[in-house]
Every structure is written in C-alpha cells, then in structure tokens.
Image (spheres, grey):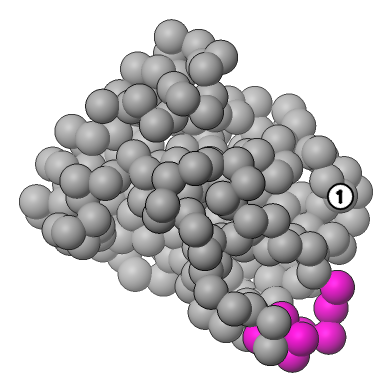
Amino acid sequence: MIEPIDKYFPSLTPGQRRRFEALHNLYADWNGKINVISRKDFDQLYIRHVLHSLAIARVCPFAPGARVLDVGCGGGFPSVPLAILFPEAHFTAVDSIRKKITVVEGVSRELGLENLTPRCARAETLTERFDYVVSRAVTEMPAFVGWIWDKIERGERGELPNGILYLKGGDLTEELARTRMEWRRFAISDFFDEEFFATKQVVYAAK
C-alpha cells in the first residue's frame, strides 16, 4: 500500500511506516463520515495526497524544533504526512471549516501525533510566529502572502531559510509576479517520477 512512500523515503523508522500504513484506513473511515478527499482521488491517496505533501520534505527538510504552519489544511495535507516524517518539528494545521479540522483532530489522535496541533481558525487571525508556512493551493499567491507574511520569523530552521513552501500546479508566472517577491520553483517531477507530478511544483520564498 505505501510502496510510493517506501520508494522515495527508504529510511523510515518502523514507527513512521506504521503511521503511514495506518493513513489509508483512517482516511477511509473519516471520509465515510466527512468527505474531505474526493472519491476519484481516494484510490490514489498515497500518490496524490501523501507523496504530494512530502515533496516539501525534498525541497526543505525541517530541523528539530522548527515551527511549521499549514494554512487551509483541509483533511491534513501537507501537515499530517510532514508531521509523521519530522517528529521533532512542530506543526500547526489551520482551516476555517470546522468539519475539516474534526478530521485532522481524529487522524492526529489515532496516530498519536503529539507534534501536530489542529486549529479551527483563519490564518490571518493567528498571533503566533512560525518558521515556515506550508500550503496546498488554497488561494492565489498575492492573497495568501497577505494573510501570512507577518507571521513568519526570520531565521533558518531547515535546509532553506525560513519562508513559504507552497504546493501548486500549472503556469504560475503571472500570479507570482503580482506578489512583487522573489520566488524559487522546484519541479516535483525532479523528485518523483509518477505522471501525476508532471506539472506540479513547490514554490518557495524566503523571509
């Protein structure tokens, strides 16, 4: 079941493997109650959701103690897979839709993810500071930057200086230009060879 994860992350601990393996049944159960993953996508859970989330880990492995905010986390992507992979970093997963946070709370509790804090909130209302902000295509980049830029603290708590790591597909040239910021783009197809990732990117801006 988790072959795509084993393929690219062969040095998982037994505990990490157990948690990744548990995701299928946990999300199947929760999806039956609260639909957070589309039915057509569910058969591809490990590629389209779990591995996609872990593309961020290929761009910027987080250091122990890093504080990472996942904005618009939905059912817990990318924060749940990243929290499994980086047990010594701390993740805050926020979404303004209560039922989605209920799913993240349930999955996190079942997995025993003590380094993940789900919160029902709008990102712009948070008062805490973070080292990195991650997200998966929640809105256009100019609006997103406006929500979270003042919540990122300068520093380097991972492979790259603190900043934004955003999962998105397609041609982003015009959208990124409107932020008037400097971005680096990482093609996920450079890390993972599945067809799904052909047009997918991680875009990064340093604080």
Q: Give the residue drawn at x 56%, y 14%.
A: 11
The residue lying toward the viewer, choosing from 129 and 172, is 172
Q: Give the residue drawn at x 83%, y 86%.
A: 180
* Rendered view: 62 above or below 17: below
Q: Position of residue 26 (x, y in %)?
A: 22, 36
Task: Rate crowding at label 1 as few (under 14), some (14 to 19) or many (20 or more) other CA atoms within 10 Å.
Answer: some
Q: Quadrant of the C terminus?
A: bottom right
Q: Is residue 178 on the magenta stretch?
A: yes
* Rendered view: 11 above or below 194: above
The residue lying toward the viewer, choosing from 165 and 131, is 165
Residue occupied by mark 1: 161
Q: Position of residue 165 (x, y in %)?
A: 67, 57
Region rendered in magenta? 175-182
How would you classify the magenta stretch by its main secondary structure?
loop
Q: Secondary structure at mark 1?
A: loop
- Outermost residue on the right side: it is 155
In-image side of 68 versus 100 (left or right):
right
Q: Position of residue 153 (x, y in %)?
A: 84, 57
